[in-house]
């Protein structure tokens, strides 16, 4: 199936406001602490780079990256999660915030949380920009959540369809191109 850029679901200004709001909460919660922000590649990379810049000097920020198998060229999950790139730092005893673009079935984050929890972090929380709440099949506890969105495939602001459209500054609905 071919997709094209459809209507704007969340414009740039709304994303910016939300990132500031989420950033302010995280900054307050972790003031004076050392935190490892974990970016889930590739989709979260745009959100991640905006979010960490909201921390200012009050939070002692470290960053790391994790890649898991994604949807590939389909808009539905394969149901299989696999680590493609692991963290390069030891998170034992550290405060960790996982940053993800979108929470859909919960399969990916459920897996990531289990994996990272085994490594004994001091704390482990999740920050997601988008949440397709009605699609959840796996339990995931999210402390920082941006927007609850309907069950539509979205692209832009890091989110892709078959590796494309990540560069768009706003979030759009992917529209089937006939
Ligand atoms: P989950 O494991 O089903 O929660 O899926 C989460 C992952 O699926 C995200 O990290 C995204 O990479 C991808 N995903 C889910 N919904 C969308 C979407 O609407 N657009 C782009 N990617 C999506
Ligand atoms: Mg993806």
Image: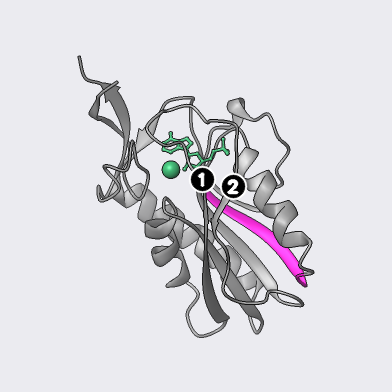
Given contact means CB atoms under 8 Å apart, are the residues at marks 1 and 2 in contact?
yes
**SS type, badge 1:** loop
Q: Residue at x 66, y 82 (%)?
A: 33
Residue closest to the eye, 74 or 57: 74
Residue closest to the eye, 26 or 134: 134
Q: Residue at x 37, y 58 (%)?
A: 46
Residue 142 counted in the magenta span? no
Separation of residues labelled 1 and 2 (CA atoms): 5 Å
Q: Residue at x 60, y 31 (%)?
A: 79
**SS type, badge 2:** loop
- Place of residue 140 in the rendered image (x, y in percent of width and height, measured from the top left): 70, 43
The overriding secondary structure of the stretch rendered in magenta is: strand
Image quadrant containing the C terminus: top left
Tell me which label, 1 or 2, sits earlier in the chain: 1
Dot 2: few (<14), some (14–19), or many (≥20) neighbours within 10 Å?
few
Visible residue check, residue 142: no
Q: Which residues are magenta?
A: 121-129
- Place of residue 120 in the rendered image (x, y in percent of width and height, measured from the top left): 79, 69
**Badge 1 is on which residue?**
69
Visible residue check, residue 15: yes
């Amino acid at each position: 199936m071919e997709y094209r850029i459809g209507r704007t679901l969340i414009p740039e200004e709304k994303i910016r406001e939300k990132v500031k709001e989420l950033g302010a909460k995280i900054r307050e919660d972790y003031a004076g602490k050392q935190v490892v922000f974990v970016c889930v590649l590739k989709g979260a990379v745009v959100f991640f780079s905006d979010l960490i810049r909201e921390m200012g000097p009050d939070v002692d920020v470290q960053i790391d990256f994790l890649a898991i198998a994604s949807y590939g060229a389909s808009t539905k999950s394969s149901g299989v999660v696999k680590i493609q790139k692991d963290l390069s730092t030891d998170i034992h005893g550290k405060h960790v915030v996982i940053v993800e673009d979108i929470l859909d079935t919960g399969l990916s984050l459920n897996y990531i949380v289990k994996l990272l929890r085994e490594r004994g972090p001091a704390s482990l929380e999740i920050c997601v920009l988008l949440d397709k709440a009605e699609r959840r099949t796996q339990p995931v506890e999210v402390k920082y959540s941006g927007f609850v969105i309907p069950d539509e495939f979205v692209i832009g602001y890091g989110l892709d369809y078959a590796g494309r459209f990540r560069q768009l500054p706003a979030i759009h609905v992917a529209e089937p191109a006939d």
